[in-house]
Image (cartoon, coloured by chain):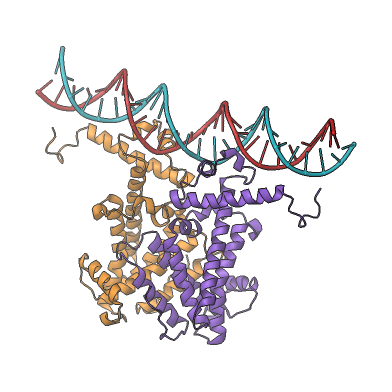
Chain colours: A orange, B purple, C cyan, D red
Amino acid sequence: MAELAAESPSRRERARADTFREIKQTARRVLVEHGVDGLALRAVAREMGMTAPALYRYFTSREDLVENVVADLYDELCDVLEAVRDAAEPATPAVQLMEVSRAFRRWATTHHAEFGLLFGSAGEDVLPAGVPTDGERPAQLAAARFGAVFAALVARIYLEHGFPVPADEDLTPGLKEQLEAWCAKLPVRLPLGVMSVFLSCWIRLYGMVCMEVFGHLRFALDDAAPMFEGELRSLGQLLGVPDEYRPPAS
Amino acid sequence: MAELAAESPSRRERARADTFREIKQTARRVLVEHGVDGLALRAVAREMGMTAPALYRYFTSREDLVENVVADLYDELCDVLEAVRDAAEPATPAVQLMEVSRAFRRWATTHHAEFGLLFGSAGEDVLPAGVPTDGERPAQLAAARFGAVFAALVARIYLEHGFPVPADEDLTPGLKEQLEAWCAKLPVRLPLGVMSVFLSCWIRLYGMVCMEVFGHLRFALDDAAPMFEGELRSLGQLLGVPDEYRPPAS
DNA sequence: AGTGTTAGCTAACGGCGCTCACTCTGCATA
DNA sequence: TATGCAGAGTGAGCGCCGTTAGCTAACACT
């Protein structure tokens, strides 16, 4: 028994870990090429010269595989966003938030299938409603990391510049309670109004990108980029970000 | 040959129309009970005591059936929204818009599967991107009717009260062009700024409801109703709607 | 060397979308 | 009235799918 696990990955464990990774990578390729519905265990296995039942040595079900792919995608997206954030010039949280938001849209529009899996209606199955699942499943952890990228930037903007925020007594009691409960789970303690503004901003960003990617904006626009920039500027105003900084058109 | 079609529905045609309706109704039931993925031709057929191949007398494919169900759902949703609009008291467009928005959220939260089909990522397949499809397929027509409900209310608010709107020259050229093209397809001619504000409002409404229904708000809130009311009030301010009118809590 | 573990296989079950060849029934015409 | 035809519905079957059961062969450890 390898009770001291972390020491030597033991040949067999290494092989297993490699196969584990390869399955997830292949699954991702299949996802991109054939869409969410085409992401089939048999297809993944075929693609890597295996048979479908073998995958059950690594994942308990198709759902389990998908969930792990989701977690990986969140991580990858976070890496991209954090890289963009750290490369932003000037390195103020306001500029960083704008750039990260643009990077988010860019990732979404260039990774259609992946975005649909993370942020679309398919996610219902991966993170079901009823069971609490103690919030520690891989996909949920990765999603939390993702949310933190945006939340931290908004928090830093507030702490450094400040922006207008509803007072606690202006919030509906029901909303206030929930924001308090949420705030208690976060590392930093912020005015509840800040959290409501953050939610509002995130809703707009999410709504804009979702509508574009899922084609629900085509009734009015065939290129959503200018509208997105407009929304972004409007969000900037909300957060008291000076308007001057507009990056070169991509 | 019954060249004069509209005259007597001819027994057989009536039976056919009945079966057509029954299939769609059954499909909707299966959708609600088993989710989008469980909406299978065989399941629908089984449910109504038929065999699957028989359905191909009425629909060319599963996709075709789903598209027809989508159109029906849009129509039903529109009926609900229009009824709420016409029953709103006082019957001003501002109050009507607030009530219709609430009704939209209510329908979404009580018709999970249907909402996902209409507004989620699944819709990509039903209304694919590449082909123009001359915009006349049933689902597209029904979706247009749906959009018009909100658009007409915002237009009436603007025409009756007016609200602050960006001037044409403040819009990005790219956005201005697209808004002009879209405006040209509408029955009424409105300032482009009004249309951009409408889009912005719709994005927020859509984003809010989608996040709630698809569970992407659970990281922060377990009851999205207060947040929704807050967003609605904020939208009201944007549209210059006097704040006083708040309906009884539902 | 012997023993247990484990990764992979084949076979199989039930369900899926969809096609094909067939029957049967109702309708319109010769 | 008899005939023929269009259309509704059927069963069999193809190639997929997720998943399970039982097997083999390689591996790891005593």
Q: Quadrant of residue A204?
A: bottom left
Q: Is residue B151 something that shows in the picture?
A: yes
Can you say which quadrant of the picture contains the N terminus of chain A?
top left
B181 or A243: nearer the viewer = B181
Taking the image as shown, residue A205 lies to the left or right of residue B125, namely left
Residue B135, compared with residue D9, is above or below; it is below
Q: Quadrant of residue C18?
A: top right
Residue located 48% across and 49% down the image: B30
Residue A89, compared with residue B64, is above or below; it is below
Q: Is residue B200 something that shows in the picture?
A: no
Q: Position of residue A181 (x, y in %)?
A: 23, 68
Number of on-image labels: 0
Q: Position of residue B211 (x, y in %)?
A: 39, 63
Residue B231, compared with residue A55, is above or below; it is below
A197 or B153: nearer the viewer = B153
Residue located 24% across and 36% down the image: A14
Q: Position of residue D7 (x, y in %)?
A: 70, 42
Q: Position of residue A28 (x, y in %)?
A: 40, 45
